[in-house]
Amino acid sequence: MLSPRISTDHLSLRIINSSDTDQIYHIFSDADVCRYWSAEVMTDKKEAEQFIETVHRGMEDGSLLEWGITLRGKSELIGTGAYSAWNKKHRTAEIGFALRRDVWGKGYMKEFLGPFLNWGFEELDLHRIQADVDPRNLASLSLLEYYGFRKEGMLRECYRLNNEIQDAVILGLLRPDFKY
């Protein structure tokens, strides 16, 4: 199982385990965290258990590489970071990330994303990393653009979540354009 050894001044990355069910549920049962996510808010801890099972299956077959983000020296999850749709032949993947609401605004995702993108380019040998972001999620758009992602298009009305239809901005980052 792939496991990046990423530690920053304040953060570490680790494998998500079944013992993290309550923490995953805490993160993804928050409507504000899931506001721009492409999945519904969790309403039952069984959904967190299923999420962890999906992560483990994806890690085994390479279809989803997702890890937990913790404060350095702590074990409690404050978020997740993932590569999905990894295509080894074309050297592409899609990135996704989420943080618990109580740690927003502390610069943690900016601190995490640089090393995580670098790991994708170096260890997964990616040439292109893509992101799919709700255009109203200005914080994520700004963060991705900070690292060199470029807006490439808009998927109009491509998601139906929480009884609303949502658009998605597609952003791409090529290895030579990565700013780290």
Image: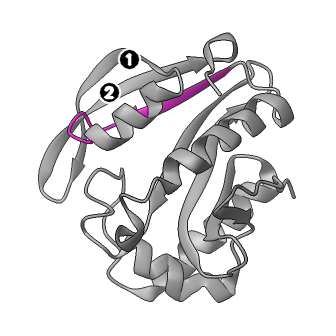
- Tell me how the rendering is colored: one colour
The residue tagged 2 is 169
Q: Amino acid at mark 1?
A: Lys
Q: Mark 1 vs mark 2: which is more N-terminal? A: 1
Residue 92 is tagged as none
Asked if the residue at tag 2 contacts the one at tag 1, i.e. Cβ–Cβ closer than 8 Å, the answer is yes
Q: Amino acid at mark 2?
A: Val
Image coordinates for residue 62, horizontal then vertical, percent: 77, 47
Image coordinates for residue 173, horizontal then vertical, percent: 56, 20
Which callout, 1 or 2, points to the residue nearer the camera?
Answer: 1
Q: Is residue 48 above or below residue 160?
A: below
- SS class of the residue under badge 1? strand
Residue found farthest to the left: 164
Classify residue 174 as left or right of residue 133: right
Classify residue 81 as left or right of residue 32: right
Image coordinates for residue 94, horizontal then vertical, percent: 57, 35
- Report the predominant secondary structure element of the magenta stretch: strand
Q: Nearer the viewer, residue 170 or 47?
A: 170
Q: Which region of the structure is painted magenta? A: 128-137
Q: Does the magenta portion include 132?
A: yes
Q: Is residue 87 above or below residue 37?
A: above
Asked if residue 47 shows in the view, the reply is no
Q: Quadrant of residue 59?
A: bottom right
Q: Does the magenta portion include 168?
A: no
Image coordinates for residue 25, horizontal then vertical, percent: 45, 80
